[in-house]
Image (spheres, grey):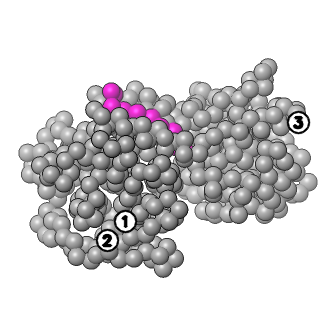
Amino acid sequence: MSSKYNIIYASPEAVPFAKTGGLADVAGALPKAIARAEHTVKVVMPFYASIDPQKYEITTLTKKLILKLHDREIKFGVKSCLDKATGTEFLFIDYPEFFMRDALYIDPATSKDYKDNDERFIMFSRAILETARFMDFQPDILHCNDWQSAPAIAFLKTQFNDDSFFEGTKSVYSIHNLAYQGNFPPETIIKMGYDTTWLYPMSPFEYWGKVSFMKAGIHYADVINTVSEQYAKEIQKTSEYGYGMEGILRDKADSLFGIVNGIDYEIWNPMTDELIPYHFSKDDLSGKAKNKAELLKSTGLPDDKIGLPLIGIISRLADQKGFDLISEISEIMLNMDLTVVLLGTGEPKYHTLFEKLQKNFPANFSANLKFDNKLAHLIEAGSDMFLMPSRYEPCGLNQLYSLKYGTIPIVRKTGGLADTIDDYNEKSGEGTGFVFEKYDAEELLKAIKRALQVYRNKDAWKKLMISAMKKDYSWNKSARRYIELYSYVLSN
């Protein structure tokens, strides 16, 4: 067996082409980091309406591939874009009927999932395998991500099981968030190309009477991984984390691993970040104070607040992210000597809450209820602390960005937050953030107060910032772990 692998990396989204969440960041960066280690990686994703072929120099490889979807033949195309720096090839499944839409998964007209999401991603999953054959690219590893590409693993082990082209191909299934499972009505089993005998209680596809793409991926994968070691443990324990999949995950415990995500330091680096006005480093922190002044100005907060600690929040506004805790203590927090800048969108109740808080505390709180990448970078660069009190967090990326920018995380001890943030020890001065364990508003408030107390000691705070900025969560480090995982699965 060669020590250099052919890898198909399948994802429904990847930066810079299409993004709804953290999976896109992973899929845009991890394959390139693996390719730098001299493996051959081809990323396969749908060709969405939002992707500009001219901007990314995307070319058409073919328009003539055919696959069967239940009772009809589908003709689809394949487009290509090469990352010249690493040799990673991005392949796009081109089928306008399914992918030339206004959004990736949710219909903007109804704010609900597209009704044919099962067919869309069954087609995508089959096209992954057909595209590998068309490219004459025999994968050692088929690496699928989340529910949208999970059927490809099931197809590999069932419908393509006797196909000599895929002989020796092993499968890796990455779970980025177990809450999103791809569960569909029973008739979906027919759309997948199986008869109804495949859907029975406790079958690889069955989940509470429905067809579950994620369950099929978990069952048929040679190895499963999720995006932090702690989250890999949590999802086996209770339904709170396992969302009903905890039993099958426990059954697969010997082949379930956790690998913390990395971040792209070419994008998130205060020394080179093109989206912030002032650069800085752990050796020269002067630019951070200038960014703080710019952040206050750009978010409408008074410049005389520059001496107060500034807490940044960048998040989807949902209970999962701890906003039920934040709402409980919001007025207490905003009556303290601090300022808060929030960026994000989400549940209407939180939009209402934060609009009200901004009206009541205009000198202390700025609510930016939108997506703004430039402001996100400025919040990381200009804030003193970053608040992330998640109920659960598979990995989390913003706490990793915060470390690099010397913006000290205040987090709950769960998932990737537990794996990446070391609680500050007031006696030794060791640690990289402020961690609380019990999911409770009072515990969150205590953690904030601890952070404010240390902030008043400028020498201790500077040491804490430098310790945080020294941490290495580059994708190269994570890629080595994934390559080890590939080696493990191919040797077993």
Circle nearer the N terminus (1, 2): 2
The image quarter containing residue 446 is top right
Other residues around mark 3 within 10 Å, as few (<14) / some (14–19) / many (≥20) = few
Q: Which residues are magenta?
A: 253-262
Front-most of residues 66 and 323: 66
* Magenta run includes residue 257: yes
The N terminus: image quadrant: top left
Image x and y of residue 295, in percent: 79, 58
Q: Amino acid at mark 2?
A: Val
Answer left or right for 276 relative to 45: right
Residue 133 seen in render = yes
> Residue beneath label 1, please?
91
Are circles 1 and 2 on residues that touch, CB within 8 Å? yes
> Residue beneath label 3, please?
458
Circle nearer the N terminus (2, 3): 2
The image quarter containing residue 218 is top left
> Residue beneath label 2, please?
78
- Residue ID at (87%, 50%): 286
- Residue ID at (54%, 37%): 416
Answer left or right for 445 relative to 303: left
Residue 353 seen in render = no
Are circles 2 and 3 on residues that touch, CB within 8 Å? no
* Magenta run includes residue 412: no
How far apart are labels 3 and 1 at the CA level? 50 Å
